[in-house]
Image: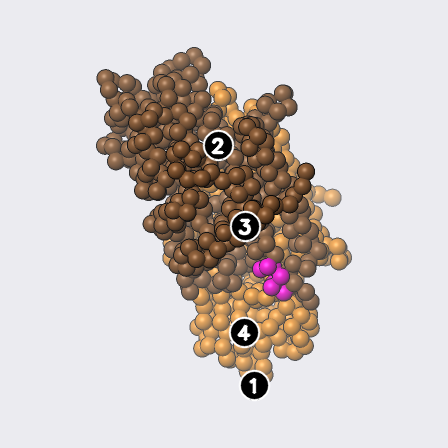
Chain colours: A orange, B brown
């Protein structure tokens, strides 16, 4: 057993931490989040140049052959700065899916430009009725000659507005809730019949709802095999859960530390409020929740990397803990900052909002507790 | 002991229901049901409709309203029906806070000057209590009022001032003396917001709304006659008012409405082969909340019953503040859970209720409400402070 990172991993960790500390102060983050694009295009180019975008992509697909551990380190550092650039959406959710299951043609035409920062991607899996169930798919695709015709609707597609290509899950056979009969299609964002409703999300990021009306997609744009999209989607979401959990752990660390520092300086009744035992114990609990999350994050990431048989169970356990701890730490950080905690001006409320959405994305605590029990 | 309503109470309830059917304006109802924030003039219109019927200033002694006082049970029924119909919450700063201070501690001139315009909602009030350095430790406040001949000169800053942007007057706690015991140098002053030297700056909260403000005072001249009670007696008035603010803070009737709405909406959300409401995990959270809510309702009723026997709302009101705000937060959280991904699209107040939004038509205000309601365990004396009150005043620790 070894909890240390190797030299390359330590290097990348330092590099991303440095970036967040020196080039991603709170004002910068807010101006990027509030811009039309919702993130910094120059930052994205920088990530590409530094090799971060392709770090966990296999060498065969044009990446640097890293593992989920490198992604974890990047995401944890991003979480500390509440980085809004869509690394999770483009590289982990969609990118790793193509890396693991895409054809050579798909890798060279999509993954390579994504790694070099020229293309943005999104994964459209949720539907108005599906909640977190990846196999609840009503959007359908019907064969017509060499093409498939897609019709349906996709909900809250993260990074939808910037994505040039969107991976869409659609039903090619079986009925609404079946795991069999789902196929993944790579669809051009400007396809005829595809319309996006774009909006800001509460965590300062961007998403779209997609209306899909007779969108024609060639068979070459199917990822993996026909009707076998569920397994692909499920494994991509596992990877994404590891990544978003790392981001959450980074955000939790900032929140508990910020709260501790604040209570040392904020004086009421002639003493720093951090001297009050009720608040001390609250902060101890925040700290412990963060540590517990980090432990499950490391455990689940290593199990995933080793291909352990209980890796999926570990991932659901992690996501449950992230939801629970994220809510507690987020709410208490706001509470202990008093009125300041609910202001838009202070960063604390924004960390709380991201932890709130992270708690829901890819399944909330109820969903993962149930999944954990079933695995 | 019994829980039955008398025949007179049943008749009263019918009267309220009939009143709401005929007098609750359709345009306001539509906005309320879509959770679109109301304009000031709409709130004023509704408060005036209530007042015409004698159901606005229900806690005032009848000598100031010229209306018959309702019994404790009638007040309970009225509030329950008003909430059930989702009528606008009345703004408490004038009718529920400033007025009780004026009719309890004010001079006859002050009563004549201020009470009628509060009763008919012509004059809007806001509350100048917290300061940047004085939150939980309210008595450490620094805003200074110096008596020079017949006027006070006020300098300082107040924060978290709700609706100050719409207010005509502000009631303030100010420091008129520097004393060893900080509570002793505080006075209660009424200030016209149009007085030169007052500046209001918005504070935007995490839900993106503008509800609270900073209010700055730069050599603001206030006639000495606007002092309420004796100079240096402000802290007693503040304590009186805090107890007043906390009674009714639980908002039980509105919570019952929201919980029942949560059940209705979640019974329409498919989950696997059933609905979200049938899901064991979600359902048990709703039931737990319902039990807690019922307990809080009856704790409030017991408190009200004691008050009607001549008791005053003391530390017991702290229990209601804590339990009520915890329930408000829990229910707002369950709405977010119900929506799953559709809690995430973020819209500003003026976009709510338009066709621009995605997801179910009730989705847009849910997350802003959850975020906004983090304030309820902080304001009106944080829940930590309330627990201190209970441990000291009730448990004697």
Can residue A358 be spotted in the picture?
Answer: no
- Mark 1 vs mark 3, foreground winner is 3
Chain label for disc 3: B
What's drawn in magenta, residue-wise? B264-270
Residue B244's mark? 2
Is A223 rendered above or below residue B239?
below
First in sequence: mark 1 or mark 4?
1
User: Circle 1 sits on which residue?
Assistant: A144
Report x, y in % for residue A271: 50, 21
Q: Assign a secondary structure to mark 4.
A: strand
- Hey, which quadrant is residue B122 in on the image? top left
- Hey, which quadrant is residue A307 in on the image? bottom right
Is B8 rendered above or below residue B245?
below
- Hey, which quadrant is residue B319 in on the image? top right
- Labels 2, 3: one chain: yes
Query: In 3D space, how far apart are the residues under numbered discs 2 and 4 (Cα atoms)?
Result: 55 Å
């Amino acid at each position: 057993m070894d909890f240390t990172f190797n030299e390359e991993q330590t290097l990348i960790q330092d590099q991303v931490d440095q970036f967040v500390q020196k080039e991603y102060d709170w004002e910068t983050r807010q101006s990027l989040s509030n811009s039309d694009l919702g993130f910094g295009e120059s930052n994205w180019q920088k990530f590409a140049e530094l090799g971060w975008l392709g770090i966990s992509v296999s060498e065969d697909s044009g990446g640097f052959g890293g593992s989920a551990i490198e992604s974890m380190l990047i995401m944890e550092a991003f979480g500390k700065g509440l980085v809004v650039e869509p690394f999770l959406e483009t590289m982990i959710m969609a990118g790793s899916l193509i890396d693991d299951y895409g054809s050579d043609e798909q890798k060279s035409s999509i993954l390579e430009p994504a790694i070099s920062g020229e293309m943005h991607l999104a994964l459209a899996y949720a539907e108005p009725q599906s909640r977190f169930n990846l196999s609840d798919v009503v959007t359908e695709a019907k064969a017509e000659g060499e093409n498939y015709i897609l019709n349906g609707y996709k909900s809250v597609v993260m990074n939808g507005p910037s994505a040039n290509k969107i991976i869409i899950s659609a039903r090619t056979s079986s009925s609404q809730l079946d795991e069999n009969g789902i196929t993944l299609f790579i669809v051009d964002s400007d396809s005829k019949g595809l319309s996006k409703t774009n909006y800001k999300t509460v965590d300062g990021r961007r998403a779209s709802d997609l209306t899909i009306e007779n969108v024609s997609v060639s068979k070459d744009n199917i990822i993996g095999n026909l009707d076998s999209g569920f397994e692909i989607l499920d494994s991509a979401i596992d990877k994404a859960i590891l990544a978003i959990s790392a981001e959450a752990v980074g955000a939790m660390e900032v929140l508990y530390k910020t709260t501790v520092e604040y209570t040392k300086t904020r004086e009421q009744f002639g003493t720093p409020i951090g001297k009050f035992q009720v608040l001390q114990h609250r902060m101890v609990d925040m700290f412990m929740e963060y540590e517990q999350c980090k432990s499950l994050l490391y455990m689940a990431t290593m199990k995933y990397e080793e291909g352990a048989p209980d890796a999926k169970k570990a991932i659901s356990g992690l996501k449950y803990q992230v939801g629970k701890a994220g809510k507690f730490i987020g709410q208490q950080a706001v509470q202990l900052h008093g009125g300041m905690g609910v202001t838009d001006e202070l960063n604390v409320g924004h960390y709380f909002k991201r932890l709130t959405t992270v708690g829901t994305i890819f399944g909330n605590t109820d969903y993962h507790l149930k999944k954990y029990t079933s695995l | 002991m019994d829980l039955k309503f008398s025949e007179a109470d049943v008749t009263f309830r019918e009267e309220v229901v009939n009143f709401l059917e005929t007098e609750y304006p359709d345009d306001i109802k539509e906005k309320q049901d879509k959770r679109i924030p109301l304009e000031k003039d709409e709130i004023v219109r509704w408060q005036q409709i209530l007042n015409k019927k004698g159901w606005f200033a229900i806690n005032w002694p009848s000598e100031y309203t010229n209306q018959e006082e309702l019994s404790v049970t009638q007040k309970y029924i009225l509030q329950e029906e008003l909430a059930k119909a989702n009528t606008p919450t009345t703004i408490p700063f004038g009718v529920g806070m400033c007025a009780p201070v004026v009719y309890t501690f004010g001079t006859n001139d002050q009563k004549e000057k201020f009470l009628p315009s509060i009763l008919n909602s012509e004059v809007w009030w806001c509350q100048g209590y917290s300061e940047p350095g004085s939150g939980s430790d309210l008595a450490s406040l620094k805003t200074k009022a110096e008596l020079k001949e017949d006027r006070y000169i006020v300098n300082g800053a107040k924060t978290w001032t709700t609706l100050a942007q719409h207010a005509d007057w502000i009631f303030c706690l100010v420091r008129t003396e520097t004393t060893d015991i900080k509570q002793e140098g505080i006075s209660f002053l009424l200030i016209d917001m149009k007085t030169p030297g007052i500046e209001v700056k918005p504070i935007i909260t995490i839900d993106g709304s503008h509800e609270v403000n900073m209010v700055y005072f730069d050599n603001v001249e206030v006639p000495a006659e606007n002092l309420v009670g004796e100079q240096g007696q402000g802290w007693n008035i503040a304590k009186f008012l805090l107890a007043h603010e906390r009674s009714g803070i639980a908002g039980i009737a509105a919570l019952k409405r929201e919980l029942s709405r949560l059940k209705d909406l979640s019974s329409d959300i498919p989950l696997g082969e059933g609905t979200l409401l049938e899901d064991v995990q979600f359902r048990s959270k709703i039931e737990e909340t319902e039990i807690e809510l019922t307990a809080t309702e009856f704790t409030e009723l017991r408190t009200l019953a004691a008050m009607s026997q001549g008791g005053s709302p003391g530390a017991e009101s702290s229990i209601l503040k804590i339990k009520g705000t915890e329930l408000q937060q829990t229910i707002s959280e369950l709405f977010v859970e119900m929506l799953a991904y559709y809690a995430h699209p973020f819209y500003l107040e003026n976009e709510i209720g338009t066709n621009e939004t995605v997801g179910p038509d009730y989705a847009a205000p849910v997350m802003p409400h959850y975020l906004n309601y983090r304030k309820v365990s902080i304001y009106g004396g944080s829940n930590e402070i309330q627990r201190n009150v209970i441990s000291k005043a009730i448990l004697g620790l």
